[in-house]
Image: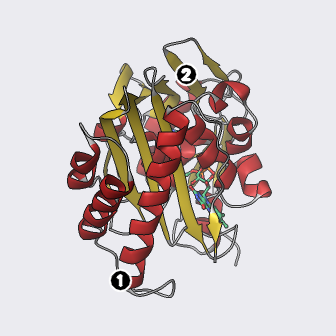
Protein backbone atom coordinates (compact mmCIF):
# COMPACT_ATOMS: atom_id res chain seq x y z
CA UNK A 1 0.00 0.00 0.00
CA UNK A 2 1.14 3.59 -0.63
CA UNK A 3 1.29 6.12 2.20
CA UNK A 4 -1.20 8.97 2.25
CA UNK A 5 0.08 12.18 0.62
CA UNK A 6 2.41 14.28 2.77
CA UNK A 7 4.66 17.33 2.41
CA UNK A 8 8.39 16.75 2.67
CA UNK A 9 10.61 19.27 4.50
CA UNK A 10 14.40 19.08 4.54
CA UNK A 11 15.94 20.51 7.74
CA UNK A 12 19.51 21.81 7.56
CA UNK A 13 20.03 22.19 11.31
CA UNK A 14 18.48 20.91 14.53
CA UNK A 15 17.25 24.42 15.28
CA UNK A 16 15.53 24.59 11.89
CA UNK A 17 13.98 21.14 12.45
CA UNK A 18 12.63 22.23 15.86
CA UNK A 19 11.20 25.40 14.28
CA UNK A 20 9.53 23.36 11.53
CA UNK A 21 8.01 20.97 14.10
CA UNK A 22 6.71 23.91 16.10
CA UNK A 23 5.19 25.63 13.05
CA UNK A 24 3.74 22.48 11.46
CA UNK A 25 2.27 21.20 14.75
CA UNK A 26 1.11 17.70 15.70
CA UNK A 27 0.62 16.66 12.05
CA UNK A 28 4.41 16.69 11.51
CA UNK A 29 6.83 13.81 12.13
CA UNK A 30 10.60 13.62 12.05
CA UNK A 31 12.15 11.24 9.54
CA UNK A 32 15.40 9.53 10.61
CA UNK A 33 16.15 6.08 9.14
CA UNK A 34 12.48 5.61 8.23
CA UNK A 35 12.63 1.94 9.20
CA UNK A 36 9.73 2.20 11.64
CA UNK A 37 7.91 5.26 10.34
CA UNK A 38 7.76 4.44 6.61
CA UNK A 39 6.34 0.90 7.07
CA UNK A 40 3.72 2.38 9.44
CA UNK A 41 2.87 5.03 6.83
CA UNK A 42 2.61 2.40 4.09
CA UNK A 43 0.19 0.44 6.27
CA UNK A 44 -1.59 3.76 6.97
CA UNK A 45 -1.25 3.25 10.71
CA UNK A 46 0.65 6.57 10.71
CA UNK A 47 -0.59 9.37 8.46
CA UNK A 48 1.56 12.46 9.09
CA UNK A 49 0.79 15.47 6.86
CA UNK A 50 4.44 16.61 7.02
CA UNK A 51 7.76 14.81 7.23
CA UNK A 52 10.77 16.77 8.53
CA UNK A 53 13.88 14.98 7.28
CA UNK A 54 16.86 14.95 9.66
CA UNK A 55 19.19 13.20 7.20
CA UNK A 56 20.67 16.37 5.70
CA UNK A 57 21.69 17.90 9.03
CA UNK A 58 25.49 17.80 9.24
CA UNK A 59 27.32 16.14 12.16
CA UNK A 60 24.34 14.20 13.51
CA UNK A 61 25.97 10.80 12.94
CA UNK A 62 29.08 9.99 15.00
CA UNK A 63 30.50 7.82 17.75
CA UNK A 64 32.80 9.77 20.07
CA UNK A 65 33.98 9.23 23.56
CA UNK A 66 36.60 9.03 26.22
CA UNK A 67 37.28 6.62 29.07
CA UNK A 68 34.16 7.78 30.93
CA UNK A 69 31.47 8.13 28.29
CA UNK A 70 30.47 7.17 24.76
CA UNK A 71 28.37 9.62 22.74
CA UNK A 72 26.30 8.65 19.73
CA UNK A 73 24.83 11.21 17.35
CA UNK A 74 21.09 10.56 17.02
CA UNK A 75 21.46 9.67 13.35
CA UNK A 76 24.14 7.03 13.94
CA UNK A 77 23.03 3.89 12.08
CA UNK A 78 22.81 0.50 13.77
CA UNK A 79 25.49 -0.75 11.33
CA UNK A 80 27.89 2.06 12.31
CA UNK A 81 27.65 0.86 15.90
CA UNK A 82 27.93 -2.79 14.84
CA UNK A 83 31.24 -1.97 13.11
CA UNK A 84 32.63 0.47 15.68
CA UNK A 85 35.74 -0.48 17.65
CA UNK A 86 34.87 2.21 20.22
CA UNK A 87 31.38 0.77 20.78
CA UNK A 88 32.76 -2.79 20.95
CA UNK A 89 34.54 -1.84 24.20
CA UNK A 90 31.08 -2.18 25.76
CA UNK A 91 30.28 -5.62 24.28
CA UNK A 92 26.53 -5.48 24.93
CA UNK A 93 26.33 -2.57 22.45
CA UNK A 94 27.81 -4.74 19.72
CA UNK A 95 25.49 -7.66 20.64
CA UNK A 96 22.55 -5.32 20.18
CA UNK A 97 23.59 -3.48 17.02
CA UNK A 98 24.68 -6.64 15.19
CA UNK A 99 21.41 -8.43 15.91
CA UNK A 100 18.87 -5.84 14.80
CA UNK A 101 16.84 -7.14 11.85
CA UNK A 102 18.86 -7.54 8.64
CA UNK A 103 21.69 -5.62 7.03
CA UNK A 104 19.43 -3.30 5.00
CA UNK A 105 17.56 -2.19 8.12
CA UNK A 106 20.77 -1.84 10.12
CA UNK A 107 22.22 0.36 7.36
CA UNK A 108 19.31 2.81 7.60
CA UNK A 109 17.85 2.56 11.12
CA UNK A 110 19.25 4.94 13.74
CA UNK A 111 19.83 4.76 17.49
CA UNK A 112 17.96 8.04 18.03
CA UNK A 113 14.97 6.89 15.97
CA UNK A 114 14.82 3.58 17.80
CA UNK A 115 14.74 5.25 21.24
CA UNK A 116 12.27 7.94 20.12
CA UNK A 117 9.97 5.26 18.66
CA UNK A 118 9.94 3.53 22.11
CA UNK A 119 8.71 0.29 20.56
CA UNK A 120 8.52 -2.14 23.51
CA UNK A 121 10.02 -4.84 21.27
CA UNK A 122 12.89 -2.60 20.13
CA UNK A 123 16.39 -3.69 21.11
CA UNK A 124 18.16 -0.41 21.95
CA UNK A 125 15.91 0.74 24.79
CA UNK A 126 16.12 -2.58 26.64
CA UNK A 127 19.89 -2.87 26.22
CA UNK A 128 20.69 0.75 27.09
CA UNK A 129 18.46 0.54 30.17
CA UNK A 130 21.04 -1.81 31.75
CA UNK A 131 23.70 0.88 31.31
CA UNK A 132 23.77 4.45 32.59
CA UNK A 133 22.23 6.16 29.54
CA UNK A 134 20.77 9.59 28.90
CA UNK A 135 19.52 11.48 25.87
CA UNK A 136 20.35 15.03 24.87
CA UNK A 137 17.22 16.63 23.44
CA UNK A 138 16.92 19.95 21.66
CA UNK A 139 13.82 22.06 21.21
CA UNK A 140 12.88 25.68 20.67
CA UNK A 141 13.14 26.34 24.42
CA UNK A 142 16.71 24.98 24.55
CA UNK A 143 18.42 21.76 25.45
CA UNK A 144 17.91 19.18 28.21
CA UNK A 145 19.54 15.86 29.11
CA UNK A 146 17.05 13.17 30.12
CA UNK A 147 17.96 9.82 31.77
CA UNK A 148 16.68 6.95 29.61
CA UNK A 149 14.59 5.57 32.48
CA UNK A 150 12.66 8.87 32.54
CA UNK A 151 12.60 9.32 28.74
CA UNK A 152 10.35 6.34 27.88
CA UNK A 153 7.15 6.47 29.91
CA UNK A 154 5.09 3.75 28.19
CA UNK A 155 4.89 1.71 24.99
CA UNK A 156 5.51 4.11 22.06
CA UNK A 157 5.47 7.05 24.50
CA UNK A 158 8.28 9.39 25.55
CA UNK A 159 8.54 12.71 27.37
CA UNK A 160 9.58 14.52 24.17
CA UNK A 161 7.64 17.71 23.52
CA UNK A 162 6.25 18.21 20.02
CA UNK A 163 9.16 20.44 18.94
CA UNK A 164 11.89 18.38 20.63
CA UNK A 165 14.46 16.23 18.88
CA UNK A 166 16.88 13.65 20.27
CA UNK A 167 20.30 14.94 19.23
CA UNK A 168 22.66 12.64 21.11
CA UNK A 169 22.69 9.43 23.18
CA UNK A 170 25.14 9.43 26.11
CA UNK A 171 26.32 6.12 27.60
CA UNK A 172 28.55 6.01 30.69
CA UNK A 173 31.38 3.49 30.31
CA UNK A 174 30.76 0.78 32.95
CA UNK A 175 33.35 0.48 35.73
CA UNK A 176 36.28 -1.95 35.78
CA UNK A 177 35.13 -5.56 36.33
CA UNK A 178 31.96 -5.05 34.25
CA UNK A 179 30.52 -7.34 31.63
CA UNK A 180 27.26 -7.46 29.77
CA UNK A 181 25.41 -9.51 27.18
CA UNK A 182 22.24 -9.24 25.12
CA UNK A 183 20.47 -12.28 23.72
CA UNK A 184 17.30 -12.33 21.67
CA UNK A 185 15.40 -15.32 20.33
CA UNK A 186 14.00 -14.73 16.85
CA UNK A 187 12.07 -16.64 14.21
CA UNK A 188 14.02 -14.89 11.41
CA UNK A 189 16.36 -11.91 11.02
CA UNK A 190 13.91 -9.22 9.83
CA UNK A 191 11.41 -9.72 12.65
CA UNK A 192 11.35 -8.51 16.22
CA UNK A 193 12.39 -11.05 18.89
CA UNK A 194 10.00 -13.51 20.54
CA UNK A 195 11.78 -12.65 23.80
CA UNK A 196 15.06 -11.01 24.73
CA UNK A 197 17.23 -10.41 27.79
CA UNK A 198 19.93 -7.84 28.53
CA UNK A 199 22.25 -8.35 31.49
CA UNK A 200 25.01 -6.13 32.86
CA UNK A 201 27.06 -7.12 35.94
CA UNK A 202 29.99 -5.71 37.91
CA UNK A 203 32.22 -8.32 39.58
CA UNK A 204 34.69 -7.62 42.38
CA UNK A 205 36.82 -10.45 43.79
CA UNK A 206 34.47 -12.96 42.15
CA UNK A 207 31.38 -11.46 43.79
CA UNK A 208 28.63 -9.67 41.90
CA UNK A 209 28.62 -6.08 43.17
CA UNK A 210 25.91 -4.80 40.85
CA UNK A 211 23.48 -6.41 38.42
CA UNK A 212 21.06 -4.88 35.93
CA UNK A 213 18.63 -7.08 34.00
CA UNK A 214 16.02 -6.06 31.44
CA UNK A 215 13.56 -8.22 29.50
CA UNK A 216 11.75 -7.32 26.27
CA UNK A 217 8.80 -8.77 24.36
CA UNK A 218 7.44 -10.45 27.50
CA UNK A 219 5.29 -7.55 28.70
CA UNK A 220 3.64 -4.43 27.36
CA UNK A 221 6.86 -2.52 28.11
CA UNK A 222 10.39 -3.60 29.03
CA UNK A 223 10.53 -5.38 32.39
CA UNK A 224 13.24 -4.83 35.03
CA UNK A 225 13.07 -7.93 37.24
CA UNK A 226 14.47 -6.48 40.49
CA UNK A 227 14.12 -9.86 42.27
CA UNK A 228 16.33 -11.46 39.61
CA UNK A 229 18.95 -8.74 40.08
CA UNK A 230 18.78 -9.27 43.85
CA UNK A 231 19.49 -13.00 43.35
CA UNK A 232 22.90 -12.03 41.91
CA UNK A 233 23.89 -9.02 44.01
CA UNK A 234 26.45 -9.76 46.72
CA UNK A 235 26.88 -13.38 45.57
CA UNK A 236 29.27 -15.39 43.42
CA UNK A 237 27.83 -16.08 39.98
CA UNK A 238 27.45 -19.85 39.74
CA UNK A 239 24.83 -22.38 38.58
CA UNK A 240 22.76 -21.87 41.74
CA UNK A 241 22.60 -18.06 41.58
CA UNK A 242 22.04 -18.09 37.82
CA UNK A 243 19.15 -20.56 38.20
CA UNK A 244 17.63 -18.45 40.97
CA UNK A 245 17.90 -15.27 38.87
CA UNK A 246 16.44 -17.02 35.80
CA UNK A 247 13.54 -18.30 37.89
CA UNK A 248 12.89 -14.80 39.28
CA UNK A 249 12.97 -13.40 35.72
CA UNK A 250 10.45 -16.06 34.65
CA UNK A 251 8.15 -14.97 37.49
CA UNK A 252 8.51 -11.26 36.58
CA UNK A 253 7.72 -11.82 32.87
CA UNK A 254 4.17 -11.03 31.84
CA UNK A 255 3.92 -12.22 28.22
CA UNK A 256 0.87 -12.43 25.99
CA UNK A 257 0.10 -15.46 23.86
CA UNK A 258 0.45 -14.67 20.14
CA UNK A 259 1.62 -16.27 16.88
CA UNK A 260 5.13 -16.50 18.37
CA UNK A 261 4.08 -18.79 21.18
CA UNK A 262 2.09 -19.28 24.35
CA UNK A 263 2.68 -17.20 27.47
CA UNK A 264 4.21 -20.22 29.22
CA UNK A 265 6.57 -20.87 26.30
CA UNK A 266 7.79 -17.25 26.41
CA UNK A 267 8.30 -17.39 30.20
CA UNK A 268 10.44 -20.53 29.80
CA UNK A 269 12.29 -18.93 26.89
CA UNK A 270 13.10 -15.70 28.72
CA UNK A 271 14.36 -17.61 31.78
CA UNK A 272 16.77 -19.55 29.54
CA UNK A 273 17.91 -16.33 27.82
CA UNK A 274 18.54 -14.65 31.17
CA UNK A 275 20.65 -17.57 32.38
CA UNK A 276 22.76 -17.62 29.21
CA UNK A 277 23.15 -13.84 29.22
CA UNK A 278 24.29 -13.85 32.87
CA UNK A 279 26.86 -16.57 32.11
CA UNK A 280 28.24 -14.56 29.16
CA UNK A 281 28.19 -11.27 31.07
CA UNK A 282 30.13 -12.87 33.95
CA UNK A 283 32.74 -14.35 31.59
CA UNK A 284 33.20 -10.97 29.94
CA UNK A 285 33.45 -9.28 33.36
CA UNK A 286 36.30 -11.71 34.13
CA UNK A 287 38.09 -10.47 31.01
CA UNK A 288 37.22 -13.27 28.58
CA UNK A 289 36.46 -12.36 24.98
CA UNK A 290 33.14 -14.06 24.21
CA UNK A 291 31.25 -13.66 20.94
CA UNK A 292 27.48 -14.13 21.07
CA UNK A 293 24.75 -13.68 18.53
CA UNK A 294 20.99 -13.84 18.60
CA UNK A 295 19.37 -17.28 18.61
CA UNK A 296 17.14 -18.32 15.74
CA UNK A 297 14.23 -20.75 15.83
C1 LIG B 1 11.27 -5.47 8.99
C2 LIG B 1 11.79 -4.70 10.17
C3 LIG B 1 12.37 -5.40 11.24
C4 LIG B 1 12.87 -4.71 12.33
N1 LIG B 1 13.41 -5.44 13.35
C5 LIG B 1 13.90 -4.79 14.42
C6 LIG B 1 14.49 -5.53 15.48
O1 LIG B 1 14.63 -6.74 15.46
N2 LIG B 1 14.92 -4.81 16.56
C7 LIG B 1 14.83 -3.44 16.62
O2 LIG B 1 15.24 -2.84 17.61
N3 LIG B 1 14.31 -2.74 15.60
C8 LIG B 1 13.85 -3.37 14.52
N4 LIG B 1 13.32 -2.64 13.49
C9 LIG B 1 13.20 -1.16 13.61
C10 LIG B 1 14.49 -0.46 13.24
O3 LIG B 1 15.49 -0.72 14.21
C11 LIG B 1 14.30 1.06 13.18
O4 LIG B 1 15.44 1.55 12.58
C12 LIG B 1 14.13 1.83 14.47
O5 LIG B 1 13.13 1.34 15.28
C13 LIG B 1 13.68 3.28 14.20
O6 LIG B 1 14.77 4.01 13.77
P1 LIG B 1 14.67 4.89 12.48
O7 LIG B 1 15.92 5.69 12.47
O8 LIG B 1 14.40 4.04 11.31
O9 LIG B 1 13.43 5.86 12.83
P2 LIG B 1 12.23 6.39 11.95
O10 LIG B 1 11.44 5.25 11.44
O11 LIG B 1 12.70 7.40 10.97
O12 LIG B 1 11.43 7.15 13.11
C14 LIG B 1 10.77 6.44 14.14
C15 LIG B 1 10.03 7.43 15.04
O13 LIG B 1 10.94 8.19 15.82
C16 LIG B 1 10.85 9.59 15.52
N5 LIG B 1 12.24 10.06 15.49
C17 LIG B 1 13.23 9.60 14.70
N6 LIG B 1 14.38 10.20 15.01
C18 LIG B 1 14.12 11.05 16.00
C19 LIG B 1 14.94 11.96 16.75
N7 LIG B 1 16.24 12.09 16.53
N8 LIG B 1 14.32 12.70 17.72
C20 LIG B 1 13.01 12.56 17.98
N9 LIG B 1 12.19 11.73 17.29
C21 LIG B 1 12.75 10.98 16.33
C22 LIG B 1 10.13 9.67 14.19
O14 LIG B 1 9.41 10.87 14.03
C23 LIG B 1 9.20 8.46 14.26
O15 LIG B 1 8.06 8.76 15.00
C24 LIG B 1 12.81 -3.29 12.36
C25 LIG B 1 12.26 -2.58 11.29
C26 LIG B 1 11.76 -3.28 10.20
C27 LIG B 1 11.19 -2.49 9.04
Which disc is residue 263 wearing?
Answer: 1
In which quarter of the view is residue 13 placed?
top right
Mark 2 is surrounded, within 10 Å at the Cα level, by few (under 14), some (14 to 19) or many (20 or more) other residues, namely some
Whether the residue carrying mark 1 lies under 8 Å from ligand 1 is answered with no
Residue appearing at x 43%, y 47% in the figure: 199
Q: Is residue 150 above or below residue 102?
A: above
Q: Is residue 188 above or below residue 166?
A: below
What secondary structure is marked by label 2? strand
What secondary structure is marked by label 1? helix
Residue appearing at x 71%, y 41% in the figure: 82
The residue singled out by tag 2 in the image is 70
Specify the quadrant that holds the C terminus: bottom right
Closer to the camera, 22 or 196? 196
Tell whether 261 sits left or right of 236: right
Closer to the camera, 186 or 162? 186
Give the CA distance from mark 2 to mark 1.
37 Å
| Any part of residue 99 in sight | yes
Disc nearer the start of the sequence (2/1): 2
Q: Is residue 94 above or below residue 197?
A: above
Residue 97, percent from left and from top: 64, 46
Residue 269, percent from left and from top: 45, 73
Mark 1 is surrounded, within 10 Å at the Cα level, by few (under 14), some (14 to 19) or many (20 or more) other residues, namely some
Residue appearing at x 52%, y 65% in the figure: 46
| Any part of residue 132 in sight | no
Specify the quadrant that holds the N terminus: bottom right
Tell whether 151 sits left or right of 184: left
Tell whether 109 sits left or right of 171: right
Residue 212, percent from left and from top: 34, 42
Tell whether 26 sits left or right of 124: left
Residue 33, percent from left and from top: 67, 47
Q: Nearer the viewer, mark 2 or mark 1?
A: 1
Closer to the camera, 279 or 38? 279
Amino acid sequence: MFPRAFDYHRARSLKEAAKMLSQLGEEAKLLAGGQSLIPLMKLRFANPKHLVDLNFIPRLSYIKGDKNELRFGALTRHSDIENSAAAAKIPILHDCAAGIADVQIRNRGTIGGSLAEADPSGDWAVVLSTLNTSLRCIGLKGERVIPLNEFITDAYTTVLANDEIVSEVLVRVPPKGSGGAYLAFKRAAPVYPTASAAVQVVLEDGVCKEAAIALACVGLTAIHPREAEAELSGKAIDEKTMDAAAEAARAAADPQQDMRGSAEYKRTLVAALVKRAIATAARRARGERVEVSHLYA
